[in-house]
Image: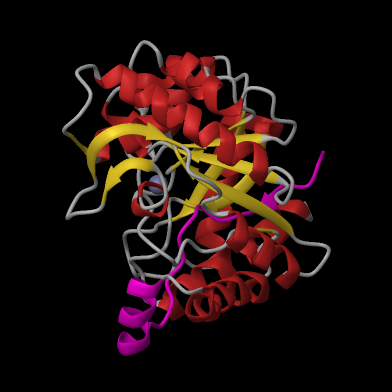
Amino acid sequence: MEKIKTSVIGSYPVDIEIINHIKGYFNQKNVTWDKYIKSAVKDMVNSGIEIVSDGQTRDPFVNIFTRKLKGCRIRDRTEIIGRVEYDGPITIDDQKYVKNLIPKNKHLIGLITGPYTLTNSCVNLFYKDEKELAFDFANALKQEAQLLQKYVDILSIDEPFFSMGIPDYCKELINTVINGLSCPIRLHACGDVSNVIPELLELPVDILSHEFKASPMLFDAFKQYNITKNICLGSVRSDKSNIEPVDEIVTHIKKGIDIFGDRITQLAPDCGQKMLPRNVAFQKLKNLVKAGEIINGR
Ligand SMILES: [Zn+2]
């Protein structure tokens, strides 16, 4: 049986120095941000996680993209005020930086907030048809994804809005972003996705990532289907500060293996960890890694 790898879902908390943070936020200077990216990546590497991310410390996961796309204006929520188009690299510099930071035996996951989630997170003041906006986002993200795959080992498309329902064009939408890519693709959708499992299984992606720890009813929901995708099993909560003991995580993973068998290829927190205190996030990753080692040693 192939060894299960430990991974993360996007964001990671950092200890922000407020003054520098504000200066950095307005300047968007790399020199200020490198420090935060470095601290997030260092924690992930030190915890023993095998597939690390850049920690998405720079901006919330919607703004990271909309800040650098044409047609978007950053307000409390991003406003769409013109045609959405790619305007040059968005996350590439950060990923290059991380790639040079991590030991050779670690893998890097690139993070792309999905077109459906971007569409639903923005205030649309321009498009008559929401579907058209979604596909313009998808075409812009496609260009980012094509550049990104040169630096990352795997790509995650994050679509938390899929838990609210999946549009009938979602397969075509996701395909627009990832068509022609050669790296494995993970689709992350947190929340209760039990009503959209058939649609998720139809998506042209390699790995499905869901929050099985906070929503254990997903086990029963998935059990009813023939699982044709690999699974990234959410195994520690991202919304609660209590640190799950190793044996509790092992029991959870075993429950997952009972249902998914060797389809489980990754273990991760349920979602991004940004809302947790840094020491809590770190300890959760460490326990996740220990649990993974126990499972792999079986
Ligand atoms: Zn999530």
Q: Which residue is drawn at 43% across and 66% down?
A: 58
Q: In this view, does 181 lie to the left or right of 199?
A: right
Q: Residue at x 36, y 25 (%)?
A: 134
Q: Check the image and report above or below for 93 versus 29.
A: above
Q: Is residue 111 left or right of residue 49?
A: left
Q: Is residue 117 left or right of residue 127?
A: right
Name which quarter of the figure residue 64 lies in: bottom left
Question: Which residue reaches farthest top?
Answer: 168
- Verify whether residue 15 appears in magenta: yes
Q: Is residue 62 left or right of residue 10?
A: left
Q: Check the image and report above or below for 130 versus 147.
A: above
Name which quarter of the figure residue 100 lies in: bottom right
In the image, the segment drawn in magenta is 1-27
Q: Is residue 166 visible?
A: no
Protein image colouring: secondary structure
State the residue in front, 209 or 295: 209
In the rendered image, residue 190, in percent from the top left (x then y), is placed at 38, 41
Q: Check the image and report above or below for 281 versus 215.
A: below
In the rendered image, residue 121, in percent from the top left (x then y), is placed at 25, 40
For the N terminus, the quadrant is: top right
Q: Can residue 2 be seen in this view?
A: yes
